[in-house]
Image (cartoon, grey):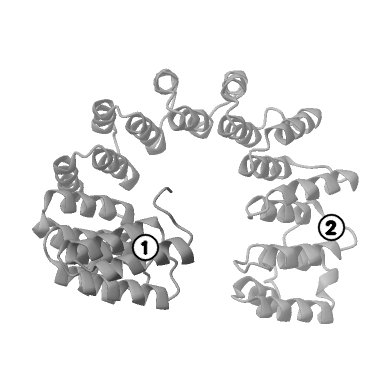
Amino acid sequence: MSSSFPPPPILSFAEMATSISELHQAHAHILKSGLIHSTFAASRLIASVSTNSHAQAIPYAHSIFSRIPNPNSYMWNTIIRAYANSPTPEAALTIFHQMLHASILPDKYTFTFALKSCGSFSGVEEGRQIHGHVLKTGLGDDLFIQNTLIHLYASCGCIEDARHLLDRMLERDVVSWNALLSAYAERGLMELACHLFDEMTERNVESWNFMISGYVGVGLLEEARRVFAETPVKNVVSWNAMITGYSHAGRFSEVLVLFEDMQHAGVKPDNCTLVSVLSACAHVGALSQGEWVHAYIDKNGISIDGFVATALVDMYSKCGSIEKALEVFNSCLRKDISTWNSIISGLSTHGSGQHALQIFSEMLVEGFKPNEVTFVCVLSACSRAGLLDEGREMFNLMVHVHGNSTNH
């Protein structure tokens, strides 16, 4: 029963908490005030804590929940959902079975969250058991549960079970169709995907994207381009699928043409788009277009993560502008190992072996562990610059300190 009165301020404080200490403060206040004995307040507190992004939030919510004498189904569902979305989804099933032992009747939300947890760790047998409970409680025809079951069976590779369930459904929506279509496409079963796509009574942009990505995945770029051309409404995922497909196939000129088309269509690129386009610019030496992409990133305030930074450094290096590559590298606040490897490789290619070794030393000082690519770049820099002693030193470092060998 909903209340017409606004919630106490302390509950709003709990919902807006950004740290575990603030959650502790809210909990302590609710305990002291006696609000914890209110089913409404306790439910809101558990929901607020369980959805907090702090790593200890879910265990903390669970500890609060475990101290509630007679938790209602909403509280049970809240904890099950929290664990289903967590790095330990198996715990959701433990809570689910505790709920059954407590003689609390699961509802459609309980089953949906529990089945989702099974999908997260590929627990198809556990999912079948829950499916049995669903049938016993008379919820076998619930659309949300059926969609979750199709996704579970399909994602766990039980394609025939998923198809059988879809065929038996009295009511289907686009989510039902897409759950099976995505499984076909991800596994490269494009003949089955094509037949299902033709059967679909309704489609959305995700349906078209599954077909495009599926054809790209099996290397049928012309089929992918045909579906792409027929797609009534394209989003950034649609464009990225085609751009990435052409990039992986080495058809870099077509990547750049497609990116121009994307701009004319008014679709805003994301980081995935930009990385693919910058890679294409690097391979064909299209410095002016690469500079345009860089200017676009700056103009639109796009965050330069490690992937984009690496792509920019690589593009400038391969297009002959090592100074600009260094400028990007030095201004990047979120370097990863690939970013370091890229600038070391670029400096090596441009004959700046000593500078490459300097960057390598800085990388070690900053706590990055070199990988095999790093050592290939460093040894190449030594070789090109005639730094034989440094090359031997790097080889010994590779073998004796970091445990790599040329046989890996």
**Residues at badges 2 and 1 in contact (C-beta under 8 Å)?**
no
- 345 and 256: which is toward the camera: 345
> Quarter of the image holding residue 114?
top right
Please indicate whether residue 158 sits to the left or right of residue 110 in the image: left
Please, is residue 4 above or below residue 327 in the view?
above
> Quarter of the image holding residue 11?
bottom right
x and y, in percent, of residue 337 in the image: 38, 63
Looking at the rendered structure, the kind of residue marked 1 is Phe
Residue under circle 1?
395
Please indicate whether residue 114 sits to the left or right of residue 160 in the image: right
Please, is residue 180 above or below residue 206 in the view?
above
Q: Which marked residue is nearer to the observer: mark 2 or mark 1?
A: 1
Say what secondary structure mark 1 lies in.
Answer: helix
The residue at the point 50 percent across, 30 percent down is 183
Residue under circle 2?
71
- Residue 28 appears in the picture as rendered: yes
- Residue 316 appears in the picture as rendered: no
Please, is residue 364 above or below residue 269 in the view?
below
- 287 and 233: which is toward the camera: 287
x and y, in percent, of residue 307 in the image: 34, 59
Q: Residues within 10 Å of mark 2 (few under 14, many from 20)?
A: some
Q: Earlier in the sequence, mark 2 or mark 1?
A: 2
Looking at the rendered structure, the kind of residue marked 2 is Pro
